[in-house]
Image (tube, rainbow, N blue to C red):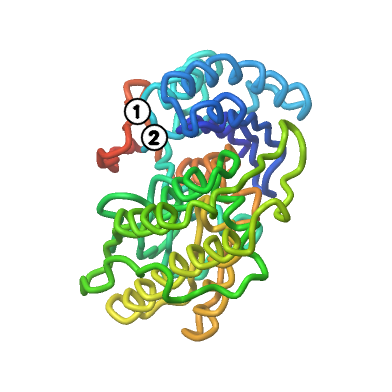
Amino acid sequence: MIVLGIETSCDETSVALVSGDGPVLEKTALQEDVHSLFGGVVPELASREHQRLLGPLCRALFAQSGISPRELGAVAVARGPGLLGSLLVGMGLAKGLCLSTGAPLVGVNHLHAHLLAAGIGRDIAYPALGLLVSGGHTQIWRMASDLDFTLLGRTLDDAAGEAFDKTAKMLNLPYPGGRFIDLLGQGIEPDRHLYPRPHLDDPGLDFSFSGLKTAVSEHVRKHPGLRAAHMSSPGAPFDPAWASPETRLACASLAWTVADTLRIKLTRAARLHGPFTSLVVAGGVAANSRVRGMAADLAERLGLELRLPSLALCSDNGTMIAHMGRKLALAGFGHGLAVDAIPRGKKIPWDYEVLS
């Protein structure tokens, strides 16, 4: 079965074709140049960019792959959570393709797709302890199978990725800032007492990173020299040498603080809700080198198989949507054309219909 995946939940416009042997082809367009002017994603601009980019990307995907839309076994689309206007752009194209080709429609939970991306190219051993960590979400899941997810803990306010991005903005680093925090912190021994590990006094599995963001803001206010004095010109490579040793230490310490907070909560989840066979860490922040190192160490200590998506599959992408959509379609699940998009903050229902 060949499945088209459409991802437009935030600021990546991505389409991909997936078959039984894995990805066939993916086309992705980034919107960093548009949103960098504002230091963050502007929802209205994001939806307009999706509208402009999605059709040409899809046409290029079919042309390069040599696959006709009539050959599709299903069309999978990110249903949510995400920016409502952006989701509606992808949903509109998906419904139009289904109307014109007769392919079934499969709305995909964007968060579950992130977790399953760790199993592309290598199966996930279940039950799995899953950590989804990104700019908008920090969640712990129990994964009983490819289609059976139970939420164990979530962020109560700011997500880990937001702490990275807001810190980068405070330090005058380029947008999006999380990757530059990682680059500056690599190879630097962190100060483990510089920032507090947030919300650990709560015995549960929920997260709160707003306090950490405030602590970083206060530290930067007291040490204005931490702000990077130089920025790379458009298109030029980022040079970590522009940052002072103190700035690099602040970045390394932040990454360690976030990673260790995640480690403590995951260890607690393994004790309270185990046994588990594997550890899955996914989402944009799963590309962070210190978070990946923490996951490897924790999996070894707990005796779990580690599943991490490739760096290319950590960010939002059409391949993960097509991958999960194919699993749902093969299990007989799909949606009618009346299915709606679900914005961030609302629960995504399991309202699949059985495909005839």
- Nearest-to-viewer mark from 2 and 1: 2
Mark 1 residue element: loop
Who is closer to the viewer here, 355 or 309? Answer: 309
Who is closer to the viewer here, 113 or 258? Answer: 258
Amino acid type of the residue tagged 2 in the rendering: Gly
Q: Is residue 142 above or below residue 22?
A: below
Report x, y in % for residue 268.
32, 77
Report x, y in % for residue 353.
33, 35
Who is closer to the viewer here, 64 or 217? Answer: 217
Mark 2 residue element: loop
- Which residue is denoted by mark 1 in the rendering? 341
Amino acid type of the residue tagged 1 in the rendering: Ala
Q: Is residue 65 above or below residue 162?
A: above
Q: Residues within 10 Å of mark 1 (few under 14, many from 20)?
A: many
- Which residue is denoted by mark 2 in the rendering? 82
Quadrant of the image containing the N terminus? top right
Q: What whole-number distance in Å separates the C-alpha atoms at marks 2 and 1?
A: 9 Å
Which residue is rendered at x = 35% and y = 65% of the image?
142
Which residue is rendered at x = 55% and y = 79% of the image?
297
Looking at the image, residue 80 sits to the left or right of residue 104; the answer is left
N-terminal-most mark, 2 or 1: 2
Pointers 2 and 1 in contact (CB under 8 A)? yes
Quadrant of the image containing the C terminus? top left
Q: Which mark is residue 215?
A: none
